[in-house]
Image (cartoon, helix red, strand yellow):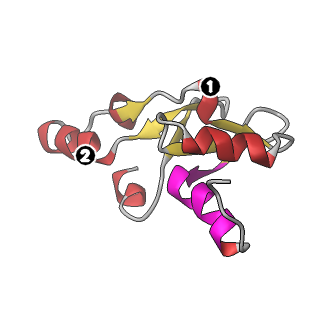
Protein backbone atom coordinates (compact mmCIF):
# COMPACT_ATOMS: atom_id res chain seq x y z
CA UNK A 1 0.00 0.00 0.00
CA UNK A 2 2.85 2.37 0.82
CA UNK A 3 4.43 1.92 -2.62
CA UNK A 4 1.10 2.68 -4.31
CA UNK A 5 0.67 5.78 -2.16
CA UNK A 6 3.91 7.27 -3.45
CA UNK A 7 2.23 8.39 -6.67
CA UNK A 8 -1.40 8.67 -5.71
CA UNK A 9 -4.17 8.07 -3.23
CA UNK A 10 -4.70 4.64 -1.71
CA UNK A 11 -8.21 3.74 -0.59
CA UNK A 12 -8.12 0.84 1.84
CA UNK A 13 -11.08 -1.53 1.61
CA UNK A 14 -12.57 -4.17 3.87
CA UNK A 15 -12.74 -7.77 2.59
CA UNK A 16 -16.23 -7.11 1.16
CA UNK A 17 -14.89 -4.17 -0.84
CA UNK A 18 -16.37 -1.34 1.26
CA UNK A 19 -13.94 1.56 1.69
CA UNK A 20 -12.37 1.57 5.15
CA UNK A 21 -10.16 4.64 4.91
CA UNK A 22 -7.52 6.54 2.98
CA UNK A 23 -3.87 5.70 3.57
CA UNK A 24 -1.93 8.39 5.41
CA UNK A 25 1.45 7.91 3.70
CA UNK A 26 3.45 9.72 6.38
CA UNK A 27 1.93 7.59 9.11
CA UNK A 28 2.36 4.48 6.94
CA UNK A 29 6.09 5.20 6.50
CA UNK A 30 6.53 5.60 10.26
CA UNK A 31 4.55 2.43 10.89
CA UNK A 32 6.54 0.46 8.30
CA UNK A 33 9.82 1.60 9.90
CA UNK A 34 8.65 0.38 13.31
CA UNK A 35 6.78 -2.73 12.22
CA UNK A 36 7.08 -3.77 8.55
CA UNK A 37 4.44 -6.48 9.05
CA UNK A 38 1.79 -4.14 10.51
CA UNK A 39 -1.45 -3.95 8.52
CA UNK A 40 -1.90 -0.85 6.38
CA UNK A 41 -5.28 -0.27 8.02
CA UNK A 42 -3.42 1.03 11.08
CA UNK A 43 -2.26 3.99 8.96
CA UNK A 44 -5.68 4.82 7.51
CA UNK A 45 -7.56 8.07 7.94
CA UNK A 46 -11.33 7.60 8.16
CA UNK A 47 -13.47 8.73 5.25
CA UNK A 48 -16.00 11.30 6.45
CA UNK A 49 -19.47 11.16 4.84
CA UNK A 50 -18.94 14.48 3.02
CA UNK A 51 -15.89 12.95 1.28
CA UNK A 52 -17.93 10.22 -0.40
CA UNK A 53 -19.03 10.98 -3.96
CA UNK A 54 -21.68 8.85 -5.63
CA UNK A 55 -22.17 8.72 -9.40
CA UNK A 56 -25.49 10.56 -9.11
CA UNK A 57 -24.22 13.40 -6.91
CA UNK A 58 -24.80 16.88 -8.27
CA UNK A 59 -21.43 18.22 -9.53
CA UNK A 60 -22.22 21.64 -8.02
CA UNK A 61 -22.69 20.00 -4.62
CA UNK A 62 -19.39 18.12 -4.96
CA UNK A 63 -17.65 21.37 -5.92
CA UNK A 64 -19.19 23.11 -2.89
CA UNK A 65 -17.96 20.31 -0.60
CA UNK A 66 -14.46 20.59 -2.09
CA UNK A 67 -14.43 24.32 -1.35
CA UNK A 68 -15.19 23.80 2.35
CA UNK A 69 -12.50 23.09 4.90
CA UNK A 70 -12.38 19.41 5.61
CA UNK A 71 -11.44 16.41 3.55
CA UNK A 72 -8.63 16.84 1.06
CA UNK A 73 -9.45 13.54 -0.65
CA UNK A 74 -12.83 12.43 -2.00
CA UNK A 75 -13.65 8.77 -2.57
CA UNK A 76 -15.71 7.92 -5.66
CA UNK A 77 -18.27 5.18 -4.97
CA UNK A 78 -20.37 3.20 -7.44
CA UNK A 79 -24.07 2.36 -7.15
CA UNK A 80 -23.27 -0.77 -5.13
CA UNK A 81 -21.32 1.21 -2.50
CA UNK A 82 -17.88 0.03 -3.60
CA UNK A 83 -15.02 2.48 -4.12
CA UNK A 84 -14.05 3.07 -7.73
CA UNK A 85 -11.44 5.76 -7.28
CA UNK A 86 -10.35 8.85 -5.42
CA UNK A 87 -9.73 12.47 -6.30
CA UNK A 88 -8.04 15.28 -4.43
CA UNK A 89 -10.10 18.35 -3.53
CA UNK A 90 -7.56 20.51 -5.38
CA UNK A 91 -8.27 18.55 -8.57
CA UNK A 92 -12.02 19.04 -8.14
CA UNK A 93 -11.47 22.77 -7.69
CA UNK A 94 -9.30 22.91 -10.82
CA UNK A 95 -12.04 21.57 -13.12
CA UNK A 96 -13.97 24.87 -13.48
CA UNK A 97 -10.69 26.61 -14.42
CA UNK A 98 -10.08 24.07 -17.18
CA UNK A 99 -13.61 24.58 -18.47
CA UNK A 100 -13.22 28.37 -18.54
CA UNK A 101 -15.44 28.97 -15.51
CA UNK A 102 -14.70 30.85 -12.34
CA UNK A 103 -14.93 28.44 -9.35
CA UNK A 104 -15.50 31.31 -6.91
CA UNK A 105 -18.68 32.49 -8.61
Q: How far apart are marks 2 and 1 (CA)?
A: 23 Å
> For residue 101, what is the image quadrant?
bottom right
Judging depth in this view, the residue of 82 and 70 nearest the camera is 70
Q: Which of marks 2 and 1 is nearer the N terminus?
A: 2
Taking the image as shown, residue 24 lies to the left or right of residue 99, namely: left
Judging depth in this view, the residue of 94 and 18 nearest the camera is 94
Q: Residue at label 2?
A: 26
Judging depth in this view, the residue of 47 and 3 nearest the camera is 47
Residue 104 vertical position relative to residue 35 in the rendered view, above or below = below
* Mark 2 closeness class: few <14, some 14–19, many ≥20 residues within 10 Å: few
Taking the image as shown, residue 71 lies to the left or right of residue 63, namely: left
As for residue 98 lying within the magenta part, the answer is: no
Image location of residue 32, percent across then percent down: 21, 43
As for residue 91 lying within the magenta part, the answer is: yes
Q: Is residue 6 visible?
A: yes
Rendered residue at 51%/45% (across/down): 73
Q: Residue at label 1?
A: 49
Write the start and end of the magenta stretch as one range.
85-97
Image location of residue 20, percent across then percent down: 54, 29
Q: Is residue 76 visible?
A: no
Secondary structure beneath dot 1 equals: helix
Secondary structure beneath dot 2 equals: helix
- The kind of secondary structure the magenta stretch mainly shows is helix
Residue 35 vertical position relative to residue 84 in the rendered view, above or below = above
Image location of residue 39, percent across then percent down: 35, 33
> For residue 61, what is the image quadrant?
top right
Rendered residue at 26%/38% (across/down): 37
> Which quadrant does the C terminus fall into?
bottom right
Taking the image as shown, residue 57 lies to the left or right of residue 87, namely: right
Marks 2, 1: nearer the viewer = 1
Amino acid sequence: ALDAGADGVVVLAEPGGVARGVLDTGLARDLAARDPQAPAALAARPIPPEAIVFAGDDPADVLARARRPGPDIFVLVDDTGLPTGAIRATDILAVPHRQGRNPTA
